[in-house]
Structure formats: structure tokens, C-alpha cells
Amino acid sequence: MNQHDFYAGSFDVAVIGAGHAGIEAAAAAAKLGASTAIFTVSLDWVGNLPCNPSIGGTAKGHLVKELDALGGVMGIAADKNMLQSRMLNRGKGPAVHSLRAQIDRREYSGWMKHYLETLPNLYIKQAEIVSAEPSKMPLTNDIPNTIENQTFGEEDGWKITTKLGATYYTKTVILATGTFLRGRVYVGDVDYESGPDGMFPATELADCLKELGLPLRRFKTGTPARVRRSSIDFSKLERQDGDEKIVPFSFDTTEPGENKVPCYITYTNENTKQVILDNLHRSPLYSHKIEGTGPRYCPSIEDKIVRFADKKRHQAFIEPCGLNTEEMYLQGLSSSLPEDVQMRIYRSIEGLEKVEIMRPAYAIEYDCVDPTALLPTMEFKEFSGLYGAGQFNGSSGYEEAAVQGFVAGVNAAFKVQGKDEFILHRSGSYIGTLIDDLVTKGCSDPYRMMTSRSEYRLVLRQDNAEERLMHIGYELGLVSEERFNRLKDILALKEQEIIRAETTTLPPSDELNKILEDAGSTPLKTGAKLCDLLRRPTITYEMLTPVDKTRPVLSEKVLEQAEVEIKYAGYIARQQSQIDEQKRLEQMPLPENADYSKVVGLRLEAAEKLQKIKPKTVGQASRISGVTPADISVLIIWCRK
């Protein structure tokens, strides 16, 4: 303890980090009535978007919609600061439709900061936290005071200390440190300690957590250069406009904004490839200076060139960082090569021949934790009251971070208040899938959410996120009654429309048969139920409008959901039966302190994996790598005994 340390206050929840995980954690805990403090190394970078100036994307859009349904912040913030909006994968089935929006990064950050500033129960502190350790909670709250003069009770908690010597006591701590823990930036031969965007790293805290015994490991991520708008020849690029009909992220956004800017597409070429290959020896990634494991699904441009050697070109997106800046983001061209090589790479690409780099690309290494050390509540198994969220847990992406922060924030508040733990299951949400994957399977590289990770993706669609989860947000106390009642009205209209479609018969007519033939579908000879026509692959509600005379005036959202449920009714029912079976296993709890080495009939490998992960249910045990169906059968019999 430094002789100048002083007692600065006590809280129910302390959140370390004010990125996307930290924001959702602090907001949820404060709104649930817990006295909450959020600490950040710079108040100017709350809610920073250090990489892509965008929110959403494939599967990530699902996460944002689910978070909004539960009462989170990211969706409404994205809608308020949107520059361009597009629904991805429209040419595919509804299960993989995903919303993505370009964001004004500085306006988004400012909006988030002000939002936190207006929340009751939330205290915002600019401070670098250098240590966190278990402690008893003080009985008095005289501020400021010396540590020596404090009296302590029997209640367990945590003591956290800032770089300036301020010491806070808190009942729970949420680590949402992003890429700051022992952060090290790499650009060619140059490497130095740093957080993202030139901020200083959290080295002392990393050392403290390692000494505490957390299972830390090293990951790496990267970002492309930001370039000057006026130095780009847009006439050579493919223009990409936003959708004409904008779908908002948030249920509360009744008037979606407008597309303010276009994005652009260009491609690398053989010259680009040659520049990279000629300079590969200067890459810290290939000279093995970088030790951390990088993201598998978002590789650097040099990594793409090596891994996909037969590919003649790679796509790159030119995206604006905001309305009041000339900076443009080069998505798909992240790199850790030296700045002079970066310049040659970018200028070899059509439209970027005279491009000016404003911020060079870089790679960043950082410490994170093995997420199998966590419970599904985001609390550490071995450290009561300590939670992890976001990139600290080995994930990658703003959206993945935000949803983990929300779950950690709710559980930290509930722990203080003596309430039951809050767990989302993989059968009911992408959030549950993400967390279950992390804490059950772990990750060997930065985890990114994808629709293919869910075995229930036809049921876990983006369009029905509110129907699946808003009742949970309402029960938590994070969704208002007025908002929940609006949803119930929408769902009632949807159910009425499905019943109407199942009971309405359309007679054959020249007009209807022409609609069917134009869509490549067989014309009618006798009447057909409206629902049966909608189940034809090429037929939509919109096509049948001229002949569907009894259709009431309904919102596009109601019609979309009704059509999906009618069209895919058989598949949805089949998937629901799989979910029901999985729920049966999820409802079979396993003893918290079970000794699996003594379970007769269980293989040694399975016993070791179960002992490490300590699954809460048979369902979770069934998803552990190395645990076979035969092992699960043994567990079920053992549980029943």
C-alpha cells in the first residue's frame, strides 16, 4: 500500500473500463438500483469505436436487437448516430438477415458519455485502476479519509486502487478492460506499450490480475489505416448506398433516420499482392515478434495474401468515420506492416493511387482471460464478486462485448441485492449461445459471433428478438410497462393475421394465376388457403396484395413476422422440438462440487473436462469438447440416482 493512498468511497458495483462492455454493465447495474461506479482512463473516449465505425453485421445485428429487447443501450445509440443503414443477406433466408449501420464514431461516443452522465446511481470516474484485490467492506463512508482510520465489517468485497492513490471499496467488480491489459502496439519493426488509439495501457492492473491467479493469455487484433477523404478518387470505386427502407435497431426508434453518406468498394490486385510478399519479412506477424493469437475471421491483408494465395483479389470497403471528419476507414485492409509498406499497398489499389494516410494501421497485443474460468453469469468460479466482460473474456467485437457487459451488470447488481442469478440459454438467444460457447468450450482465438454458431438459428431470428426476450427485460425491471404493452399489441395482431391466413381461401382467378405464373409458381384450378400460397418458395405477402381483399391494414413488421412464421412453420416446429429436448437436459442440474473422478462409468478424459469446466447442468456438460453422448448417458443415470 502506498503511504499516500486514501479512502475515496464505496459502491455496490465497480466497472473497470468504459467501452461497450463497460457501458452496458454500468447502465444495467445502475438502472437496477445498485450504486455503481465506472472507471475509464479517459472520459473523452467513452464508447470509443477503435476499429470499424459501424454497429451490427452478420449475427452481430442479432446481438444488438436482443440487447435492445432486454433493455440495453447500444441499439438506440446506434440509431441516434447512424450514417448509413443496410440489411445484410437479404438474398438469403430470414434466419441470417442481419442489420448493419455505419456510425458517426465521435457523435456516438459523445452520446454514450452523456447518457451515462444522466443515469441515477451511476458515478463516472476518469482514473486508471492499478490494482484489484479481495477485501472486507468498510463500515463507514467518511470521504476523504485515510485507509488506516477505516473500520471494516464482515461483508466480503473488493478493494480497487487508482494510479493517483484513491482507494475504493466495492461489493462486486466487473473487468471490462478491452485491449488495454499490457497492450502493445506493432507497426513493422516498431513496437511499444500502448492501448488502442494511442492511449496508455493498463500494465499494473494486468500484473495485479496475474498475481491474483487469473488464467491470463495473450491475444492480438488489428486495425487498418484511416485515410483522407479528398485523396481518394471515388470515380474509380463502386458506390454502395444504404437501404431505401431503414430498419432501426431499437424497438423505441419510431422514426428511423436517413442515409447521410455512401460507402464504397474497391479491390486489391496482383501489384498489391507483390508488394506484400516482397515485404513479408518486415511483418511482425511473420517474424514472430507478435506472440498473441489473432482473430481467425478478420485477418490482416498480409495474412489473407498468404492464406489465400490462389485468390487474385480481395474486397475492401471505404467507409466514413463521421460527418465532421475527413477520415475514411479501409475495412478489409488491416495490417501491421511498416508505414512505408502500408503506403505502397494502399496506393497499388484502384481509387487509392494518391491516398494520404492520416492514421497508420497497427496490430495490438493484449492480455485476456480463459473464459472457461467463468460461470454463465460472467462471474469467476474461484473469485466471488469478480466478473469479466467483453474482449477481456477472449471475444472480438463491440456487439459481443456489449451483451456480455449487460449480463455481467445484471448479475453483479442481483448478487448485491440477494436475487437469483440471471442466465440466458443458447436455445433462446444468440447472447446465450455466445456466453455458453465462451464458458463451456472456451476459445483459442478471439471469438466472433456468427449465425452458424447457433443450432437454432431459424427460431433465433433478428425479426423476433423482442418476442423472445422483451418479457425477460420487463421482468428484470429494465423494460417499461408501456414498451412491453406496445409489443403485446403487435404480437396480438401477428397472431390474428396468422389465423386469418390459415382460414382464408382465395378462389382461382385470372389475376391470381397471373401473379403465380409471373413468380414461376403453378396456377390454381381450385381455391387455396392463403397460408398454403405463402408457403410456396417464390410467393410473398406483397405479391398477393391485389387479390387478398380481406387483409387488414398492418405494419410492415407484423406482416414480415407473420409471413416468416407461416412460410417456415414446419421447420420452426421441428427446431422447437429440438429446443424442448435440450431444455430437458438444461433442467437437470449437476452438483456444484461434484467429484467426477468418482462417477462410475465415466471416461477419464470426460471426468477431467467436467472437473475443469464444472458445468451447471447436464445440457451444458453435453457441449463440452471431449464429453461424448455415452458420457452424458452415464451422467443422467448418476443424477437420477
Image (cartoon, rainbow, N blue to C red):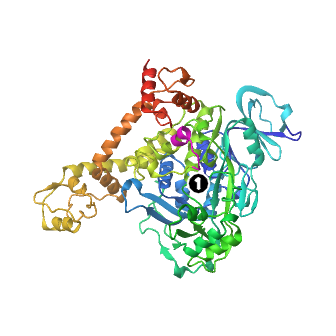
| Residue 518 percent location from the top left of the image | 21, 69
Horizontal side, residue 175 vs residue 613: left or right: right
Q: In which quarter of the image is the N terminus?
A: top right
Identified at 81% across, 47% down, the residue is: 163
Q: Is residue 524 visible?
A: yes
Give left or right: position of 15 versus 301.
Answer: right
Q: Name the residue under label 1.
A: 295
Q: Position of residue 278 (x, y in %)?
A: 65, 70
Q: Which residue is drawn at 47% across and 69% down?
A: 242
**Which residue is found at the position 13% from the left and 67% from the top?**
510
The stretch drawn in magenta includes residue 554: no
| Residue bounds of the magenta highlight | 436-446
From the top left corner, tell me how far across and down residue 115 is, in percent: 62, 54
For residue 3, what is the image quadrant? Answer: top right
* Residue type highlighted by circle 1: Pro
Residue 608 x/y as whole percent: 56, 29
> Quadrant of the image for the C terminus?
top left
The residue most toward the right is 3
Q: Is residue 632 left or right of residue 532?
A: right
In depth, the one of 450 and 28 nearer the eye is 450
Using residue 263 as the reference point, say whether residue 511 is left or right of it: left
Reply above or below: 176 against 114: above
Name which residue lies at 70% across and 72% down. Answer: 340
